[in-house]
Image: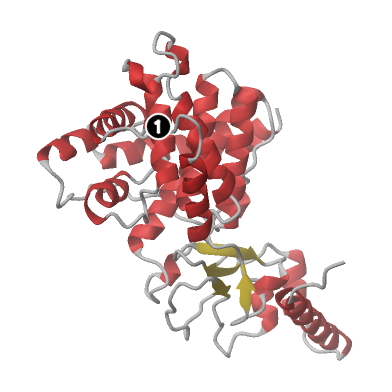
Amino acid sequence: MRRPSNAYITGLEARIASLEKMLALATSGSDTSALDKRGNQERNWSVVDFTDVEPCSPLKETRCFEAPSEKTVDELVDALGCFTLGDTGELRFFGASSNFSIIHNHPLRVASSGDARKRGIAAARQMPGFFEPSDELRDHLLELYWQWQNSWQYIVARESFVLDLYVHKTGRFCTPLLLTAMLALASRYSSRPEVRTSPEDANTAGEMLTAQARTMLHHEYEAPTTSTVQAAGLLGLYWAALDREGLGFMYIGMASRMAMNLGLHSDCSAYISRGFITEEDVEARNIAFWGIYVLDKLYCVGMGRPAGIQEFNITTAKPKAQDRVLIGLTEEQLKISQPWATSHITINAMQMCEIFIITSEVVDQL
């Protein structure tokens, strides 16, 4: 039997120390109103205010952000939890019930997102009949995606994705897995024979790209990023288009679980001013989460199954209904990428979210 990790042991020690302190307060006759309030009232679902934290560079061994000295362990136990920073700069989340949410400045060994992504790409390239679309075919499929898919199922932050694809090329918002999943789903709208496994059979559109995306996802889900969540959701939609709702339901479930792992449901805007995350990152996370939320509810209604995302866990804000100026794109790239105003898409998507929020309690009891 393997020895527990140092991080796990430290977490248990922190939890025991917290419980001992609470017990001492209870047995000493001290004012226990704070304890009663914690036990009998709803938790204060807010992000821990790490005022004294200095920004740190992304590490392969992530660290829980250190709390200010005036915050006691007991107060932190009642907070929503804490975020850690992965090697690609991606936030990961530990909730209040986890021991890892009350230990600070201690290395937590997690799989490397960058390494997982590289392994996935390498595995996909080794597949028989590996298919890499030309730039012309890629843009054709992306035009279909922005026109017909993203306009009503808002999962991908379009401006951030497009700028990363054509201009910045950082892999922050446009990853090979996400791009492949988008192209696979967009192939369902295309009449081009090269996107089909069998040129005469329209039902095979996107099969090659989907197989490659599944292979990459198999490696990435051990260390997911926001783009991994988006890709899993899009693959769930792909299977629904083939009348394989059961498989699609499982992919949407994977997407919602990975979203929780990354804390997409939790408000992380407080970390912008401290340099851990940018406003653009927060917006991309919000778009991804609420997009997966809608898919989760659609499958819940369509298949009569319990929803994976519960509203009382959500503290993150909804995406902003605003349009951005895309600088650095050619006229053709702009034409492909902006068939509809982002503000219009966002408003429609958030109205759909509001409908599900209002009706969720009734739907869950059907």
Q: Residues within 10 Å of mark 1 (few under 14, many from 20)?
A: some
Q: Is residue 104 left or right of residue 334?
A: right
Q: As shown in the figure, which amino acid type bears the numbered disc 1?
A: Phe
Q: Secondary structure at mark 1?
A: loop
In percent of the image, x 57 and y 17: which residue is there? 243
Please provide percent x and percent y for residue 99.
72, 72
Whether 89 is drawn above or below 210: the answer is below
Residue 221 position, x and y percent, is 58, 49
Label 1: which residue? 131
Q: Position of residue 146 (x, y in %)?
A: 30, 33
- Nearer-the-camera pick, 7 or 29: 7
Q: Quadrant of residue 249?
A: top right
Image quadrant assignment for residue 296? top right
Q: In this rendering, is residue 347 above or below 84?
A: above
In the displayed structure, does residue 140 sit left or right of residue 120?
left
Question: Is 303 situated left or right of 26 in this image?
Answer: left
Q: Residue at x 66, y 65 (%)?
A: 43
Q: Residue at x 54, y 63 (%)?
A: 112
